[in-house]
Image: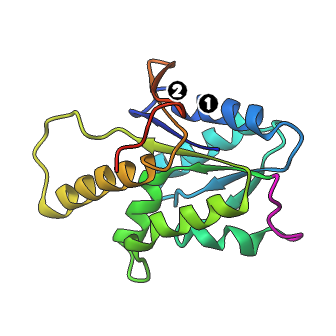
Amino acid sequence: MMVMVLGGSASGKSEYAESLALQLADSGAHYYVATMEAYGESGAYRIQRHRALRNGKGFETLEVPRNIIDVMNFIEDGLQKESTLLIEDLSNLLANEMFSDEGDASRIQKQILELQKRVQNIVIVSTNIFDDGCDYDESTIRYIRFLGELNQQIGAYCDNIIEVVAGIPIGLKKESYEKID
């Protein structure tokens, strides 16, 4: 199963995604794939906060800020089919790929779909940054467009899409809906 969890900043999406990943993992291995790179004090604070929130939940944390397929290289005994991956989050992964000299944003969808073939469950967190109505420079507008396209592309393969608003999960897509090609 692949699920996308969307939400704005501080919406509760990460906590919800963690709970969902643990529920889906049942007795299988569960990995927290952390994509954020700490830039400045606020970035370091957010990383520490997320580590504290998942402390004691049994996640094995993998730091993979770009080239998400590298998840397979970090797991000592190999990635097992019964595993659950929580990718936190798509918006950071995209930024790392787009704004780094060694990054390649075009491979993200392909790599996530490759991981989907190898594990039982993937929960992908992504940030809703589309509603603020602000003016941005050209590179930020390009990033926002690409994130929207990436959410759509990956969302088409997801069994469920859930938006978290003020800590409340709202189902946007259920696996029983038909995909439109």
Residue 107 image point, x, y percent: 44, 73
Q: In this view, does 8 lie above or below 50?
A: above
Magenta-drawn segment: 76-82
Residue 100 image point, x, y percent: 39, 75
Q: Is residue 156 above or below residue 95?
A: above
Q: Which residue is drawn at 69% across and 43% down?
A: 51
Quadrant containing the N terminus in the rendered view = top right
> Decide: marks 1, 2 in contact (CB < 8 A)?
yes
Q: Name the residue under label 1.
A: 15
Q: Looking at the picture, which amino acid does disc 2 mark? A: Gly
Q: Which residue is drawn at 13% across and 62% down?
A: 138
Residue 97 image point, x, y percent: 41, 70
Q: Is residue 81 magenta?
A: yes
Q: Looking at the picture, which amino acid does disc 1 mark? A: Glu
Q: Which mark is residue 148?
A: none
Element assignment for label 1: helix
Displayed quadrant of residue 9: top left
Q: Nearer the viewer, residue 69 or 93?
A: 69
User: What is the distance, in whole Å, between disc 1 and disc 2 at their CAs?
Assistant: 6 Å
Q: Main secondary structure of the magenta part?
A: loop
Q: Is residue 143 magenta?
A: no
Q: Residue at x 41, y 61 (%)?
A: 94
Mark 2 Cα within 10 Å, few/some/many (few <14, many 20+)? some
Mark 1 Cα within 10 Å, few/some/many (few <14, many 20+)? some
Q: Mark 2 points at which residue?
A: 12
Using residue 135 as the reference point, say whether residue 175 is left or right of it.
right
Residue 23 image point, x, y percent: 76, 31
Q: Which of 73 and 120 is in front in this view?
A: 120
Q: In the image as oriented, which residue stretches furthest toward the left?
A: 135
